[in-house]
Amino acid sequence: MTSTTLPMLETYPQPINLDRRKLAATIDALIACSEACTACADACLSEGMVAELTKCIRTNMDCADICGTTARVLSRHTGYDANITRTLLEACIMACKSCGDECASHAGMHEHCRICAEACRSCEQACQDLLATIA
Amino acid sequence: MTSTTLPMLETYPQPINLDRRKLAATIDALIACSEACTACADACLSEGMVAELTKCIRTNMDCADICGTTARVLSRHTGYDANITRTLLEACIMACKSCGDECASHAGMHEHCRICAEACRSCEQACQDLLATIA
Amino acid sequence: MTSTTLPMLETYPQPINLDRRKLAATIDALIACSEACTACADACLSEGMVAELTKCIRTNMDCADICGTTARVLSRHTGYDANITRTLLEACIMACKSCGDECASHAGMHEHCRICAEACRSCEQACQDLLATIA
Amino acid sequence: MTSTTLPMLETYPQPINLDRRKLAATIDALIACSEACTACADACLSEGMVAELTKCIRTNMDCADICGTTARVLSRHTGYDANITRTLLEACIMACKSCGDECASHAGMHEHCRICAEACRSCEQACQDLLATIA
């Protein structure tokens, strides 16, 4: 899979207030995390021990929704509003941290939780890196 | 339209950490704001002066996405995580404030912006009220 | 909760190819169904017998996503494309039917499934009514 | 960007009714198309000739929403329902076709429309390929 996120960003016809390369890396991390969380929620739902994974499923669903929305907001540059981007990144970092912690606690038992925890950690880090560049 | 948000909340089989009535009011305000913003973006797109409404359209799209995601997160109670709820409400309040301000500035000229600005203000207030009850 | 769906539709500045009243009723039914399904998935997740409700949770999640997207598409009128509206309504009717059937089968035991099944039936009917008017 | 879609699918603990490799390719195409459409809508919004691109923006928004929802539904396997998958793929194919046609008509003038049209074509084809395998 070759991402078209950066090529699309490079065609945006006006200046962008954030570094395009860093922005593309963050959007790609958000999309990958959202997808991993959606898949992990469903995999947990099909485990025999689902009753012990309900908090994991719920956090996965929140993280999938929040990362998906953050990717969309970061993909828009028209009428940029730093306040929305900053507070949304903060919420997203929190969701990735919570979901990463929860999945990591099941990583030894469920491979989907191990992969998902890694996607959450990468996404959290990418959001932190981008947030650090916002005035 | 009779909302089933509160009746659904009343059937949740475990304790909920937030006031169910306040929670339902906030979810309903978020849903109404998300819908108004989606419709306002499209109405702006069909105005003859669309070139002057591009910031409004973009903020509408962000606000629609963020309110929709916040409504979903607030509709889940399993494995509640106050940190996610709090930071997401803060991002949502910011989006509603920005979109409310932007739409209000066109309210005299476009009735859809006037109605949408009101939906944003109501939603911002409902989120503030709920946030104040979160430890 | 007073819906602003119809008032917003009435401010759309161009002709709309569908009946505005029927359109607003369908959008409101879709929004209510999407919210009920999100809440029902979470309520099922907190039932002691969650292991027997995994199909219900999954169908709820699909129906919530599909109804949410259909509400957004129906809220846009600029550059109307009947083919997209028609096929999406067909998919949505299928999702509402499946979810309504699944929830109805648990309605005697779980009040959230009973309310959710009703929301699915109402939404399915509203989508059918609107679809019948599309050439 | 290395996709974790296939690795996640390989950890799903139960049988899957569709070919996992084909499924992963389709999900990745849907995610890439959804992201391209979100970015293309915003790039169009910042073009000086935005008034001539309103149909393109609207179709981009529909296609982004429908592809995003289709990716989520295809990422769930618990309690699989072929009827939902089939009808949703049909709606998604229609959205990709419409959006691909619309963007292709501006591809000579706007590079973002050219890249987006390609993403729509690839996604349409992937959905067709997957649909052909569903009984």
Image (spheres, coloured by chain):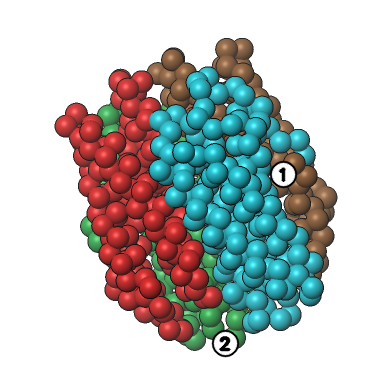
Chain colours: A red, B cyan, C brown, D green
Q: Is residue B14 above or below residue C125?
A: above
Q: Chain of mark 2?
A: D
Residue B95: which disc? none
How many residues crowd mark 1 within 10 Å: few (<14), some (14–19), many (20+)? many
Location of residue D122 (image quadrant): bottom left
Percent across and percent down for residue D36 are 43, 66
Q: Is residue B118 above or below residue B25?
A: below
Left or right of residue B92: residue C71: right
Q: Amino acid at mark 2?
A: Gly
- How packed mark 2 is, by other alpha carbons closer than 10 Å (few <14, some 14-19, many 20 or more), is few
What residue appears at the point 44 percent right and 50 percent down from the top-left corner?
Answer: B87
What residue sits 54% from the left and 83% below the top? D47
Residue where numbered disc 2 is placed: D48
Q: Residue at x 50, y 53 (%)?
A: B90
Type of amino acid under label 1: Asp
Looking at the picture, how far across and down is residue A61, in whole percent? 42, 40
Q: Residue at x 50, y 59 (%)?
A: D64
**Callouts 2 and 1 in the same chain:** no
